Structure formats: structure tokens, C-alpha cells
């Protein structure tokens, strides 16, 4: 049983001023594996004060100064990849094949930010005018539970590259992962106050970050509802905001697709991180003329996604993070059935033999209409809705008929055609045939999927303000 009672403020681990204690529940068996003392408003204000004091000097740092820090952060985090991965598997239930990738992507964010910063001009001069890109100030970074190490590293790397100091409020559901990561980053020998981390409730720690006038910027990953509240409450102090919110990501399978390749790719995107991913391709749009073939192909490919122990490399789908999340997924499955969708595979309840944890059956619905709840709302679990379309134009219309616009995919053998279809989807990122990544490409959404972008120079820009000096 691990006990966490300290937060990271001004370069040291300090005892929590808060008194609320939260149990950390292992999602595979519902056992308590740790207890964490939550931060309160005073802890948060102490962290903000430390960040504000540090910004007085770090805000004037050079590009070279920041690059050196990014390199130290990368080195420190790299030394703990195995430990961070194990914590994600144990605490969150992330399947190890995906958890390792997520952690490594987060660690690599420091290198990606260094590359972007090296290539970014921070000063531009013409005639008697000089424009410099200045750090916005103290940044509040609020992260989600489904990829904790990635979100912390990504946001921290961009903020440091811009010259900002930070206060991080990680999800309280990721306390063990946060502890392992901050212990690692502590070894980077950072300037005191540059990095501060307080774990607590969103309506306590998050609310203080949003309303505090000494915090200039909020970068948030999470739900649409909380994103709206951040915009609303942050308006009082004119907070700059980056909001990476929900997704209901469509995958368009074109009529020329090779099903032996396309269906496994579609299922990988659907069951990504056990479906607990904003980028999960939870709607599969398929040509009506090939619907029967596609059903058979899905049934044949499902064996590659067995439910099981997330620490087992063979496992394709692990548990949901909590009882609340389990119940939410179950409610959507019931709603899909009630609204007339057909369960091709999966359905309600626990998979046989996995009743002791928060496991759900990987579920595929067919005969789904795009106005059904399961086709429009983010489920955040391993549930795929198959929607049949009449034509390419119809597929694009269905894909865009959503309040979300974070991620999408196109599957087909004619790459020129696939690119043409991709260019018509209102989404922040569209991949073709595989779940590819580029750490310099922007990440963020259209519509209700958020405001602003992360990754590469786009993420660094989000923490900068231009200043013009005219002689």
C-alpha cells in the first residue's frame, strides 16, 4: 500500500495543506492500492506564488537556456520509462502494448519541443520595428487520466520552450503515475519554482488555477463541460486558454479498401487504449454495398482484441478506469440497443471470467443511424458504431455531422482519393490507413473538440504573446 501525502512546490516535495484522503482503486480487481492526500486552495496558491516568483527570471531566459532544460527533462524522464509504464498499467489499467507507447511519446515530447524551438524565430525586425515572442506568464496545466504522462510532458515541454513557469493539476485518478513522473523530473535540476505539481479535485485546485489572477494561461485536456466552465470562469481574468476536449472520431472505409488490412486498422483505432481515448475511431462508416462482407471481416478480426490482464502483452482491451466509467459505458450500450442498433459482437455486462474488475465487453453495433446517441456522443469505452453510407459524398456528410472534430481516418487503396476525402473532413487531424503520428504536427479540434493546438511549434505558440518595439 503506497501513501502519497506531498505535493511538488518550489523545487521540493512538501506536505499537503489539504486533508482529504482519496483511495486509489486498481481497476482490474477493485482493490485499494494507495491513498493520496488531496491538495486544497492553499497548496494551489503556494504553487502559483512559487511559479510567479520563478517567472521573474525564467521569463527572460534565452532559447539556449530553455533547450538545455528540455534536454535535462528528457534525460530524467527517459530513465524512468519502465516504472512509468508499470504505473499506468497498474493504476489505470492501460494495456501494456499501448501504455508503453504513450509513456515513450510523452518522454519524447521534450525532444520534439527542442527541435521546434530551435527552428522557431523568436524575434523579427523590419525598418525600426522589432517584434519578439514573449512567454505569456504562469501557466496552469490541467491534465486528464487516460494518458497522464503524455499530457504532463507535452504541456510542460511546450511551456518551458516558450519560457513559462507552470503549475500542473494532474488527474487525481493518476496519482501514482504522477508521483513516479515528478520524482523523475525532479532529477532534471530545474530552477526552483519552474515546475510545481498539486494533485487535487478539479473544483478545488482547478478552480483556483482558473480564477487566480497570477495565472495567465490555462492548458486543459478533458471534457467539453469542464472546458466550457474554464472559458466562462477564466473570462473574469482574461485567461488565455488551450482546450483539448472530446472527440467522436469517424473512420471512413472507402469502397476500394482491402478489408484484410482496413478492418484490423479500424478496430485498432476503435479500441485504442481500451476505447478510453479522445482520438478513438468510434464510428466506422462503410459502403452499403459491402456491409455483409464487412460484418464478416469484423467478426473474424475480433480475436485480436481479447479482454484480459493489461500487463499481458497479448491483451487487447483492459478495464475501464473506474466504476463510474464502467457504468457510463454500460449505459451507452443499453441506449444503443434501446434505440434499435444491432449488437454484432459484445453487449452488456462483464466478459465471462472478468467480473471482479471494471471490464466491459468490446462491443460492435451495426445498423446504426447517425442520429442515434451512440453515434453522436463520446462513450469513452470499447464501443464501435458501424454506419452504412450510399456514396463518397454521403460518407463525408455523415463524418461532418457531429459537434466534434478532433480526429478522423480514411481507409482505402487509392491514396489520392483518400487524401481528397480527408481534405473535406472538418477535423483537426486526419490519418490515412494507419494511426500514424508526427510530433511536429498540430493536435487539437474543430467545433466542440476544443480551442487551440498542441505539439511542435503550434504548441509553443500557444504559450507566447507577440510584443512590438518601435523606435
Image (cartoon, helix red, strand yellow):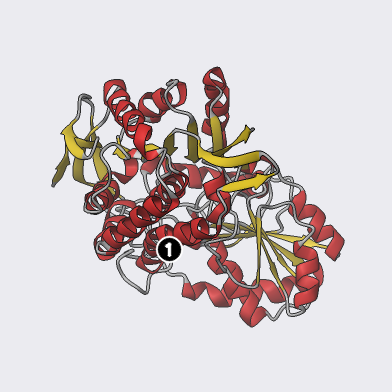
Pick whichever, 319 or 75, lies toward us.
75
Query: Does the image show residue 414?
Result: yes
> What element does badge 1 sit on?
loop
Residue under circle 1? 317
> How far across and how far down the image is residue 302, in percent?
52, 72
Residue 253 against residue 182 in the figure, above or below? below
> How far across and how far down the image is residue 352, in percent?
38, 62
Q: Is residue 420 left or right of residue 355?
A: right
Pick whichever, 281 or 461, lies toward us.
461
Q: Is residue 275 left or right of residue 335?
A: left
Q: Quadrant of residue 423?
A: bottom right
Dot 1, crowdedness within 10 Å: few (<14), some or many (≥20)?
A: many
Q: Is residue 251 left or right of residue 224?
A: right
Q: Quadrant of residue 130?
A: top right
Residue 21 against residue 443 in the figure, above or below? above
> How far across and how far down the image is residue 440, in percent?
55, 61
At a point 43% along the width and 68% down the height, the residue shown is: 316
Pick whichever, 214 or 131, lies toward us.
131
Task: Please identify the quadrant where the C terminus is shown.
Answer: top right
At a point 44% along the width and 44% down the height, the residue shown is: 159
Amino acid at each position: 500500500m503506497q501513501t502519497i501525502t506531498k505535493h511538488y512546490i518550489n523545487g521540493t516535495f512538501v506536505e499537503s495543506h489539504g486533508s482529504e484522503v482519496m483511495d486509489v482503486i486498481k481497476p482490474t480487481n477493485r482493490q485499494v492500492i494507495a491513498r493520496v492526500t488531496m491538495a486544497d486552495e492553499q497548496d494551489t496558491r503556494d504553487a502559483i506564488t512559487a511559479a510567479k516568483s520563478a517567472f521573474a527570471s525564467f521569463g527572460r531566459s534565452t532559447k539556449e537556456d530553455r533547450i538545455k532544460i528540455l534536454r535535462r527533462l528528457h534525460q530524467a524522464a527517459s530513465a524512468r520509462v519502465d516504472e512509468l509504464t508499470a504505473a499506468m498499467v497498474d493504476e489505470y489499467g492501460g494495456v501494456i502494448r499501448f501504455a508503453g507507447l504513450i509513456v515513450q511519446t510523452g518522454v519524447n515530447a521534450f525532444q520534439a519541443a527542442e527541435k521546434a524551438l530551435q527552428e522557431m524565430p523568436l524575434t523579427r525586425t523590419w525598418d525600426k520595428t522589432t517584434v519578439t515572442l514573449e512567454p505569456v506568464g504562469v501557466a496552469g496545466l490541467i491534465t486528464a487520466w487516460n494518458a497522464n504522462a503524455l499530457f504532463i510532458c507535452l504541456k510542460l515541454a511546450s511551456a518551458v520552450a516558450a519560457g513559462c513557469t507552470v503549475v500542473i493539476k494532474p488527474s487525481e485518478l493518476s496519482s501514482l503515475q504522477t508521483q513516479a513522473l515528478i520524482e523523475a523530473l525532479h532529477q532534471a535540476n530545474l530552477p526552483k519554482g519552474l515546475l510545481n505539481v498539486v494533485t487535487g479535485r478539479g473544483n478545488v485546485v482547478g478552480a483556483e488555477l482558473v480564477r487566480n489572477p497570477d495565472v495567465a494561461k490555462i492548458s486543459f485536456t478533458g471534457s467539453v463541460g469542464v472546458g466550457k466552465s474554464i472559458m466562462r470562469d477564466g473570462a473574469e481574468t482574461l485567461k488565455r486558454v488551450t482546450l483539448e476536449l472530446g472527440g467522436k472520431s469517424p473512420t471512413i472505409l472507402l469502397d476500394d479498401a482491402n478489408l484484410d488490412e482496413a478492418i484490423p486498422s479500424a478496430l485498432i483505432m476503435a479500441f485504442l487504449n481500451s476505447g478510453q481515448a479522445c482520438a478513438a475511431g468510434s464510428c466506422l462508416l462503410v459502403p452499403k454495398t459491402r456491409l455483409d462482407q464487412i460484418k464478416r471481416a469484423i467478426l473474424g478480426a475480433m480475436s485480436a482484441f481479447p479482454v484480459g490482464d493489461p500487463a499481458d502483452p497479448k491483451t487487447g482491451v483492459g478495464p475501464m478506469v473506474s466504476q463510474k466509467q464502467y457504468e457510463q459505458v454500460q449505459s451507452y450500450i443499453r441506449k444503443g440497443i434501446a434505440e434499435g442498433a444491432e449488437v454484432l459482437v459484445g453487449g452488456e455486462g462483464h466478459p465471462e471470467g472478468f467480473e471482479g474488475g471494471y471490464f466491459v465487453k468490446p462491443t460492435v453495433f451495426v445498423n446504426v443511424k447517425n442520429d442515434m446517441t451512440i453515434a453522436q456522443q463520446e462513450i469513452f469505452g470499447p464501443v464501435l458504431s458501424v454506419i452504412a453510407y450510399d456514396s463518397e459524398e454521403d460518407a463525408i456528410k455523415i463524418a461532418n455531422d457531429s459537434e466534434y472534430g478532433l480526429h478522423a481516418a480514411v481507409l482505402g487503396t487509392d491514396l489520392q482519393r483518400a487524401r481528397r476525402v480527408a481534405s473535406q473532413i472538418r477535423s483537426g487531424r486526419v490519418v490515412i490507413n494507419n494511426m500514424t503520428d508526427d510530433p511536429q504536427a498540430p493536435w487539437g479540434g474543430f467545433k466542440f473538440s476544443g480551442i487551440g493546438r498542441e505539439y511542435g511549434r503550434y504548441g509553443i505558440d500557444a504559450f507566447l504573446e507577440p510584443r512590438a518595439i518601435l523606435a
